[in-house]
Amino acid sequence: MKTTLKPITFNSKDSYLAWRGQWKAEYRGLSQSIRQVKIAIREKMRAREWAGGEQWKLSQLRAEATARLELLKEAKAEAQRQYLAAHQTAA
């Protein structure tokens, strides 16, 4: 799966929500890819065939999913930081 998600560059609630929507759509696709590869591994193993290629692909997809979750964690922290900065100056 090729990533098209931009780095964290939002500066308003609307741009954050747009970024978050894109993140969700891409993560949903990544999750579906992981499910499909797991099914392929299961089918190959039941047929007593070599599934090393699929297992390698699964490990790569899982690593990408973990990286995506870390990116989301950073984005949430940045959104919170921006929110607090905006409300401290307004108060």
Image: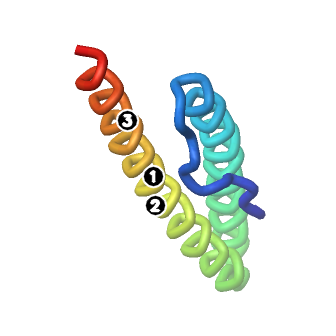
The residue pinned by badge 3 equals 82
Q: Secondary structure at mark 3?
A: helix
| CB atoms of marks 2 and 1 within 8 Å | yes
Q: Which mark is residue 69?
A: 1
Relative image position of residue 67 (x, y in whole percent): 48, 63
Looking at the rendered image, the quarter that the C terminus falls into is top left
Q: Residue at x 30, y 17 (%)?
A: 90
Residue 41 lies in what quarter of the image? bottom right
Q: Earlier in the sequence, mark 1 or mark 3?
A: 1
Quick check: 25 left or right of 12? right
87, 18: nearer the viewer: 87
Q: Amino acid at mark 3?
A: Gln
**Quick one: label 3, few (<14), some, or many (20+) residues within 10 Å?**
some
Q: Residue at x 68, y 45 (%)?
A: 26
Q: Which one is closest to the eye, mark 2 or mark 3?
A: 3
In the image, residue 61 above or below residue 16: below
Q: Earlier in the sequence, mark 2 or mark 3?
A: 2
Spatial CA distance of label 2 from label 1 is 5 Å
Residue 86 lies in what quarter of the image? top left
Quick check: 87 left or right of 41? left
In the image, residue 61 above or below residue 88: below
Q: Secondary structure at mark 2?
A: helix
Q: Which mark is residue 7?
A: none
Looking at the rendered image, the quarter that the N terminus falls into is bottom right
Q: Residue at x 61, y 48 (%)?
A: 31
Q: Residue at x 56, y 40 (%)?
A: 10
Spatial CA distance of label 1 from label 3 is 20 Å
Spatial CA distance of label 2 from label 3 is 24 Å
Q: Amino acid at mark 2?
A: Thr
**Quick one: label 1, few (<14), some, or many (20+) residues within 10 Å?**
some
47, 10: nearer the viewer: 10
Q: Which mark is residue 66?
A: 2
